Amino acid sequence: MSGLIGKKIGMTSIFDENGKNIPCTVIEAGPCVVTQVRTNEVDGYSALQLGFDDKAEKHATKADLGHFKKAGTSAKKKVVEFQGFEENYKLGDNITVEVFSEGEFVDVQGVSKGKGFQGVVKRHGFGGVGQSTHGQHNRLRAPGSVGASSYPSRVFKGMRMAGRMGGDNVKVQNLRVLKVVAEKNLLVVKGAIPGHKNSYVIIQK
């Protein structure tokens, strides 16, 4: 799937032609530089490696600097491979937000917000106060019983318990592109996407 690397700017809402208020997310999409061209002859598959967001030279390794120098560009913070581009791009080419068009549907992938260590009510939707299930007596947000006694004498794998929540790779599919603002490299898509503000996202057609 072809696409671009972007950065989540934040959420807003716009009115459509019928006067309906639509929640949407603004993404800074590109411009991305082609930093490597994968070919079937050399790599066994064809793809384009794209780089996004400049990195200070002092923060880049020498291997990074050499890699990006071949493409004639500065070191990049985020590098992702994409397949399925219709045009034949060459090393060092810039790909802008204009690869997207208004009305088409895209998939957006990002890392969801980290929630830290959470209990079973917030993490798994257990009943909690007023619905004291799972064998609990007087602890209203506790998980309750987690296993039987003499058999199987262990707790089954996958038991829903308290633990780290969030920080997962999440892909939201079929978001409609509402606007493409080419001069500012902005993409406005309907609905919400994963991640906090200024987090990197991958937009796929």
Image: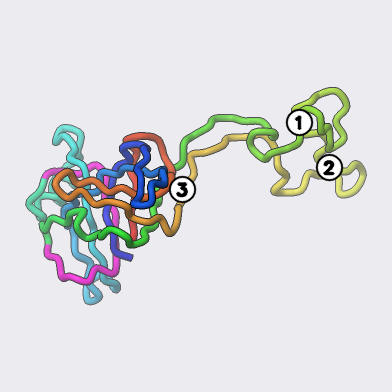
Q: Which residue is mark 1?
A: 128
Q: Amino acid at mark 3?
A: Asn
Task: For marks 1 and 2, give the CA distance.
Answer: 19 Å
Q: Residue furthest front?
A: 18
**On the image, numbered disc 3 is attached to which residue?**
169
Identify the image quadrant of residue 95: bottom left
- Region rendered in magenta: 74-90
Q: Is residue 193 visible?
A: no
Q: Quadrant of the N terminus?
A: bottom left
Q: Find residue 15 and report its image quarter.
A: top left
Q: Residue at x 22, y 55 (%)?
A: 50
Estimate the spatial distance between the alpha carbons at disc 1 and disc 3, rounded to whole Å: 28 Å
Residue 14 percent location from the top left of the image: 34, 43
Badge 2 amino acid: Gly
Position of residue 107 measured from the top left corner of the image (x, y, whole percent): 39, 57
Q: Residue furthest top?
A: 138
Q: Residue 19 in the image: state x and y as whole percent.
A: 38, 46
Residue at left 40%, top 35%? 196
Closer to the camera in the image, 77 or 182: 182
Q: Horizontally, is 51 left or right of 10 in the view?
A: left
Residue ID for mark 2:
147
Q: Amino acid at mark 1?
A: Gly
Left or right of residue 181: residue 130: right
Return the disc, 2 or 3, that comes first in the chain's sequence: 2
